[in-house]
Structure formats: C-alpha cells, structure tokens
Image (spheres, grey):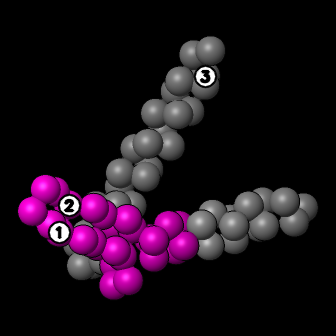
Amino acid sequence: MGRVIVGAGLVLVCLGAIVMLLERLHINLGRLPGDIVMRGKGGTFYFPIVTCVVISALLSMVMWLVNRR
C-alpha cells in the first residue's frame, strides 16, 4: 500500500511540474481555444472540450508507446 501511495505522489508531482512548465510557456490547459464557456445571469457553465481532446490524444500516444513492447 505504501508503494502505491508514494507512486501516486510522484505522479502528482510530475503532473504539477508539467502544468507549471506549460503555464510559463503560456499554454494554459483548460483555457485553450475551443473550450466552451457560457456566462449568464445565474452562473457560468464551463466545459473544456478541446483540453479533454488534447489530454486524451496525449494519453493515447503514451499508452500506445508503453504497449508496443
């Protein structure tokens, strides 16, 4: 159980570092062109569809590379 928690922590640290690096490069995930934002009197609806597609494509490529062996 301890190894799983440490592994998850390392993955989160790596993801945080990647997000910080992307922000420095002015690539804000969740604020890409094509993401849907609707503002109204009662609230705001936000759906990051392009961000979801980009993350899905990246994860698909990583999984393809991992499973190639």
Residue at the location (52% across, 74% down)? 54
Q: Which residue is mark 3?
A: 3
Q: Is 64 within the magenta? A: no
Q: Amino acid at mark 2?
A: Thr
Direction right: furthest residue: 69
Asked whether disc 1 touches disc 2, contact meaning CB atoms under 8 Å apart, the reply is yes
Please state which of residues 57 and 40 is positioned toward the viewer in this rendering: 40
Q: Amino acid at mark 3?
A: Arg
SS at circle 1: strand
Coordinates of residue 36 in the picture (x, y in percent): 34, 74
User: What is the number of the mark on residue 39?
Assistant: 1
Residue at the location (61% across, 22% down)? 3
Q: Nearer the viewer, mark 2 or mark 3?
A: 2
Name the side, left or right, on which 1 lies relative to 63. left
Q: Which residue is mark 2?
A: 44
Looking at the image, is mark 3 or mark 1 earlier in the sequence? 3
Q: Mark 1, residues whose alpha carbon is within 10 Å: few (<14), some, or many (≥20)?
A: few
Looking at the image, is mark 2 or mark 3 earlier in the sequence? 3
Q: Quadrant of residue 25?
A: bottom left
In the image, the segment drawn in magenta is 29-55
SS at circle 2: strand
Coordinates of residue 60 in the picture (x, y in percent): 69, 67
